[in-house]
Amino acid sequence: MRKIIVHESVLTAVFAMTVLLMLQFPIRSQTWIYPLVRYVAQVKMNFVARSMAVYETEHFIIKYEKQDADVILLVAQAAEKAYQPVVRELGYTPHGKTMIFIYPDKQQLNQAFGWSGDQSAMGVYWGGAIQILSPKAWLSEVNAEEFIRSGPMVHEFTHLVFDYMTSGNYSRWFTEGLAQYVEYKVNGYEWKTDSNSLNRDLYTMEELDKNFDKLSNQALAYRESLMAIRYIGEVYGEAKLGEVINNLRKGQSLSSAIREALNMDYADFETSWQNWAKINVEHEK
Ligand SMILES: [Zn+2]
């Protein structure tokens, strides 16, 4: 027992030190420190989940509690079904198998990642692994079709692949927009509510860049993120979206990545996607 406590505290200390080290360096240097932090985070998550059961598929290693044994095949199927479309959309194949942790309820999910994560309470991408809420906790009737279409696998796996591509060089709105864009293309799923219509005052890019998680209307922040990405993909074309991502991979700031790929400064980008979305998207259906 004592030995386990020592191990866990050592891991936590190594992790904290690595994060501190990371914060000492400017953005550009993070490209080499970031994968290290992500790796340490994974080791820690695996250690904490050491008593969980394991199910392995071609591309995923899934850890789960015994009470979720009856949904493990469903999660495995959805994960494998998400794999190729996401890899194809992003043009990048992650190395090795991806870890997925299934938690029986929200409390255990929150305890497990403990950091600010995704608005979607069904899943979180953090530290190189996907953590999801058991489908039994949010689907009134668990069925494969519904879990594949509106579940978290495509969304969270997109976050993961994009994170590995760019070594963390992105702002929060961009990865949320991209994850929703791939979900929208692959599953036709969009998060729409009464509170995130685009015919209202929108958050500025500055607000999305600096304060994404603290914005009071999260549904709107997510929807705006999707719109900004859709604008690039649909108006300029997916090759241009790929260029923006490539610029991020090279370590450019987001505003410079967009400026170089679209030949448009960040302020014009903001006005342009907002006008496009208000005129074209809000009247789609
Ligand atoms: Zn997300």
Image: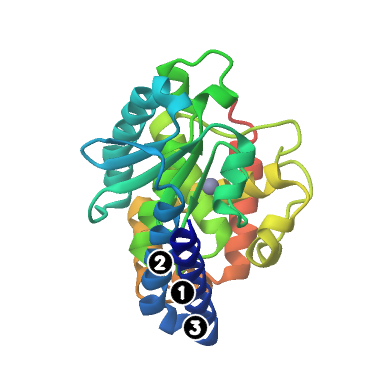
Q: Which residue is mark 1?
A: 14
Q: Say whether disc 2 or disc 3 marks the residue closer to the N-terminus.
A: 3
Q: Quadrant of the C terminus?
A: top right
Q: Is residue 85 above or below residue 91?
A: above
Residue in front for this viewpoint, 84 or 25: 25
Label 1 CB less than 8 angstroms from ligand 1: no
Dots 2 and 3: beta carbons under 8 Å? Answer: no
Residue that extends furthest to the top in the rendered view of this protein: 141
Q: Which mark is residue 165?
A: none
Dots 2 and 1: beta carbons under 8 Å? Answer: yes
Q: Amino acid at mark 3?
A: Leu
Crowding at mark 1 (Cα within 10 Å: few <14, some 14-19, many 20+): some
Q: Say whether disc 3 or disc 1 marks the residue closer to the N-terminus.
A: 1
Q: Residue at x 53, y 73 (%)?
A: 16
Q: Which residue is mark 3?
A: 21
Q: Amino acid at mark 1?
A: Val
